Structures are given as C-alpha cells and as structure tokens.
C-alpha cells in the first residue's frame, strides 16, 4: 500500500540565509484536502511561524490519537458495543533524549459515550489494549503511548 502527501513551501522573496523566512507551508493530501501547516511557535518564534496552522508535532500526536480511536471503534462494533461519541484530548510530551529533541510520550485521554449497555471497565481496558496493539501508527513509532482509562 502506497500513500502520498505533498508538502509545499515557497520562499516568497525572503532573504532566507538570515533565517528570517516564513515556515508556513501546505500539506496536500491525495483526497484533495489542503491543510495549512507551519513550524510550531514554540520552536520558531512569530512571525516566522504561524500559530493558527497545524505543526508537525501536533499532527503526529493527532495521528497517534486518530489511529487508536479508529482501531478502538473497529474492535467495539463487532462485539455489539455501540459508541455514540469518542473524544480524545491527547497530550504530547517533547523533551531532550540523548541530546535530541523528541516527542517522547503521548498520553491519550479518551472520553467515550456509549449507547445502551456500557462495557465493563475490564472490557474497555481490553479494547484499548487491543487497539494499541493493532494501531498502525503505534506500531510504527518509538514514542511511548499511554491510554488513560
């Protein structure tokens, strides 16, 4: 399976070599969606970053959270567990490890609303464990991922 994303940036007349150029750019996905992106203002100060745009670190955290959620939903459905909504306020922790700045940990904090009978705490824990084990993104990264239950 091959997936394609186009990332596009332009200098737009900035000197560039003085590092005073915009980090704003766009991500174009194969389905046609375009997302404004930028370096994080925590890393590159304004006005050279764009606070309103998605930064790669946020996208990384969102990808981990989204993959976990989609896997969780796919595991719950065949078990007859009906989910009305799933909201995760995921938190990424960035720190220096071995002299390099990394997203070392992502904490997932899902809040799930069920229709009908709510699964037991043990069933929810098993679903989250299975979702983590089967999530393509979680299987692809070194970041430690925690799920609050």
Image (cartoon, rainbow, N blue to C red):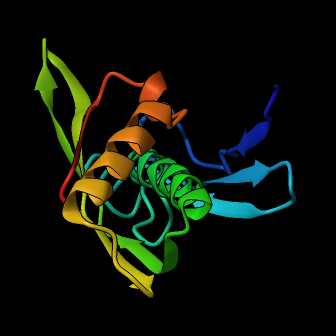
Residue 87 placement (x, y as % from top left):
39, 74
Q: Seen in the image, is 19 located left or right of residue 104?
A: right
Residue 12 placement (x, y as % from top left):
68, 52
At a point 49% along the width and 70% down the height, the residue shown is 81
Of residues 40 and 17, the one drawn nearer to the viewer in this rendering: 40
Q: Seen in the image, is 24 located left or right of residue 13?
A: left
Of residues 17 and 35, the one drawn nearer to the viewer in this rendering: 35
At a point 22% along the width and 55% down the height, the residue shown is 122
- Count of residue discs: 0
Q: Is residue 23 above or below residue 76?
A: above
Please identify the residue farthest to the bottom as the structure is shown: 116
Residue 4 placement (x, y as % from top left):
80, 35
- Looking at the rendered image, the quarter that the C terminus falls into is bottom left
At a point 51% along the width and 60% down the height, the residue shown is 76
Snapshot quadrant of residue 36: bottom right
Q: Is residue 15 above or below residue 53?
A: above
Q: Seen in the image, is 18 located left or right of residue 105?
A: right
Snapshot quadrant of residue 15: top right
Snapshot quadrant of residue 133: top left
Q: Seen in the image, is 91 located left or right of residue 139?
A: left
- Looking at the rendered image, the quarter that the N terminus falls into is top right
Of residues 68 and 77, the one drawn nearer to the viewer in this rendering: 77
At a point 43% along the width and 45% down the height, the residue shown is 64
Q: Is residue 21 visible?
A: no
Residue 131 placement (x, y as % from top left):
44, 44
Q: Is residue 143 visible?
A: yes
């Amino acid at each position: 399976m091959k997936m394609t994303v186009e990332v596009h940036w332009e200098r737009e007349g900035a000197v560039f070599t003085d590092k005073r150029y915009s980090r704003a750019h766009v991500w174009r996905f194969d389905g046609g969606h375009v997302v404004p992106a930028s370096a994080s203002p925590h890393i590159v100060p304004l006005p050279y970053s764009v606070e309103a745009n998605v930064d790669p670190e946020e996208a990384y955290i969102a990808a981990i959270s989204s993959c976990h959620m989609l896997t969780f939903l796919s595991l719950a459905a065949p078990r007859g567990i009906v989910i009305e909504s799933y909201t995760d306020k995921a938190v990424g922790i960035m720190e220096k490890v071995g002299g390099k700045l990394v997203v070392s940990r992502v904490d997932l904090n899902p809040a799930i609303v069920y229709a009908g009978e709510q699964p037991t705490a043990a069933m929810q824990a098993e679903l989250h464990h299975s979702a983590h084990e089967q999530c393509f993104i979680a299987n692809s990264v070194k970041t430690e991922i925690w799920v609050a239950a």
